[in-house]
Image: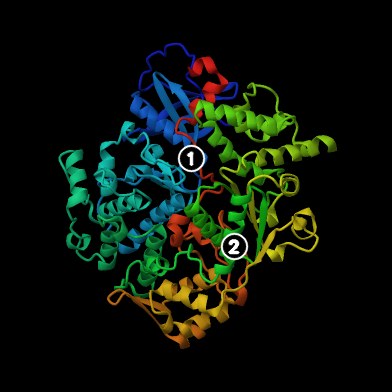
Amino acid sequence: MPMQHQELAGQEEPEAVLPDAPVVAQHGASSVRYRDFRELGAGTPRLERARAHGTASSLVAGRGQSTPAIAALLQREYSLRHVLRDEWAAVPIALVPHGESFLLILKDSGGEPLLRGAAPCTDAHTFVAIALRLTAAVGAMHAAGVQHRALTPGRMLLGEDGRVCLTGFGQAVTVEDEDKSAGDDQLSWDEDSFNYMAPELGARMNLRVDGRADLYALGCIFYELMTGRLPFEGADAAARVHAHATRLARAPVELVPGLPEQLSLLVMKLLEKTPELRYADAAGVLADLRRCETLLCQHGRIPRFALDAYSALCKPGGTGLVLGRDAELQALLALYRKVADSAGSAAAWISGPSGIGKSTLLREVVARMQRSGAPLLAAAKSEQGHRGKPYALLVEVLDPLLQHVIGCANEEFAAWRNRIAAAARPVERTLAGLMPALGVILGAPSGQPVPASPDAAPALERERVLQGMARLIACFAVPTRPLVMLLDDLQWADVETLQVLERLLHQHDDAALLLVGTFRDNEVDVTHPLRAGRLAEVPRAVRIELGPLDEGALREMIALTLQQDASGVGELAELIGRKTERNPLFARHLLHLLADDGLLAYDAKTASWRWSLEQLASHPRRRHRRRPDGAPLRATALGDAGGTAPDGMPRPPHPARGACARDGRAARHRCSLAPARRARQCARSRQHPARGR
């Protein structure tokens, strides 16, 4: 049984704890006493490896550091446990009281810190191998939507198996955070962090801080690995912050004779003061490091080549670009205006094969809706293999809406609570078992047993739950702010979700609701509810079938991607179209494959791409490749998932996780109304009014 978070509220005044005292962590009714501590890093907070009799080792953070600032770092890191992954991070498993503060217990995957002050890594093969491992871990972290913001060598554990484990997430934020700077002034930055801190983060410039700040820190770490020294020295933190913001580091090739100039240039690009001049993301760094590795293996040296060609291929034609879909966009916008004007419900079904642009179309139509008004937006995406979990898709849709209500001011909260209570009755307890936030709003007493799963209840009760879920969704669709509900990949939706949608659209046609659902037409047969059931019989529903791009749209997409005039890419577009059947995702992926193989060559001096049609025509048809970020070609969390493209190419993942769509990394479900900052405190105070006041 995993360790449980131990609350301090209501405890007596803690006794003083000696720094070398054992750590006791609860495992249910039993406890584990950790001893034999070995320090891994003396930063803030301090990280140690500890062992206990009969159990595997664990990592312990914060022992002997009992300041409020350390406690805040540990609490923030613990709060991120659900987004951290074992593959690239030390995942917190318990936050336990210790003296006057906390200790954070984390899973230990082994490995030792990347040592500071070690001898320079002058062997190019060794440096590239280490750099690839570090960059892949940072890229995986960014792909999960996490920005570290305090990377140092001491927060990177290298295992003998080649794995890199990142630690020290006390300063981290997620891309879903609406206010990334909230509370930062109260957080403690240790001295070592200032040695690797990006200018936009350390100097408080008027610049948006994003994942490129981590790439700057990675550049500082690479610099130190190459040269054995930091890029900037300073007598104190202020001097180092100023140096990062204003001074230029000496190129590593000037300090280490024999170092390949290309590696030196790569590091200096990471150390650019302006984020826009750095690599766009870790995928671009990985692509260049892999090219260096290939050249070393083939030639024993690294000839000069244009850096970040991967990013140059991605930037202009980013995955959010919608071409050749004007009629579809206008149809969806007209449907939204009709809902907003008449306060009635409407539905639109978007179908098409994988990679054809269904998710991209949704993102664009939402962006245009938000320009003309402020709809209440809720979205979710079905996951393959989750069909057996009842109501899974609708729980994802409703949770951010309920969280918004929890964060409302008292008057607005009371109005919402009355509306929601009326909608959920008489199955509020069953629905609260599916959505804990609903229980918080309705004031359900804690500790009551959760009823059986709705699908196991009798037929009458099951119908009541279906009706109650439909009413709950409809209660958020008000004329003053229509609800736009986006459901992606409905071919994988569970049966209960589809049955609720039937009742929602047929029985609540007076709700100000626009439901837009997408599905793969080749995975939905003629007997599926979307084709033959009541969902297929929704009055005035709009059906949009996305097909291949027309020749002009594909030519424009390729021209924008390569930053060239459309008249100059006609033959290239024709060839790409034949190989991909003008599927936009496959076309973009093929461009990347061609660039990886050198058949599309980027000339940095002229900022243009060059190619040979004869060589492109002979490009192998069937390739098993990896994504530029190093992951295998497989299904990902956003957009269309895996399969096989026309022409035998492996179908790539949705680009929202890749370098092309840094700004398109949306959460799996997101409400356009951000919860109030103190939503949790509001929830607790409503459950315990006396304590809350």
Using the rendered view, name the quadrant where residue 325 is placed.
bottom right
Q: Closer to the camera, 337 or 557?
A: 337
- Quadrant in the rendering for residue 596: bottom left
Left or right position of 461 against 606: right
For residue 62, say whether it is visible.
Answer: no
Compared with 492, 437 (above or below) is: above
Above or below — where is 503 with respect to 606? above
Q: Identify the residue shown where x is 47% and y is 88%.
A: 614
Q: Earlier in the sequence, mark 2 or mark 1?
A: 2
Query: Percent x, y for residue 11?
Result: 48, 14
Residue 191 vertical position relative to residue 553 in the rendered view, above or below: above
- Residue at image coords 61%, 41%: 478
Determine the secondary structure under disc 2: helix
What residue appears at the point 60 percent right and 27 percent down from the top-left corner?
Answer: 440
Categorize mark 1 by other alpha carbons within 10 Å: few (<14), some (14-19), many (20+).
some
Q: In the displayed structure, does residue 525 sit left or right of residue 143?
A: right
Q: Amino acid at mark 1?
A: Ala
Residue at image x 38%, y 74%? 563
Which residue matches tag 1?
674
Residue sitting nearer the eye, 445 or 530:
530
Residue highlighted by disc 2? 358
Residue that sits furthest to the left in the current view: 235
Q: Determine whether, in the image, residue 370 is placed left or right of residue 458.
A: left
- Residue 477 image position (x, y, % from top left): 62, 43
Describe the element under mark 1 as helix, strand or loop: loop
* Residues at discs 2 and 1 in contact (Cβ within 8 Å): no
Residue 427 at x, y percent in the picture: 74, 31
Query: In this rendering, is residue 550 above or below 335?
Result: below
Q: Looking at the figure, which quarter contains the N terminus? A: top right
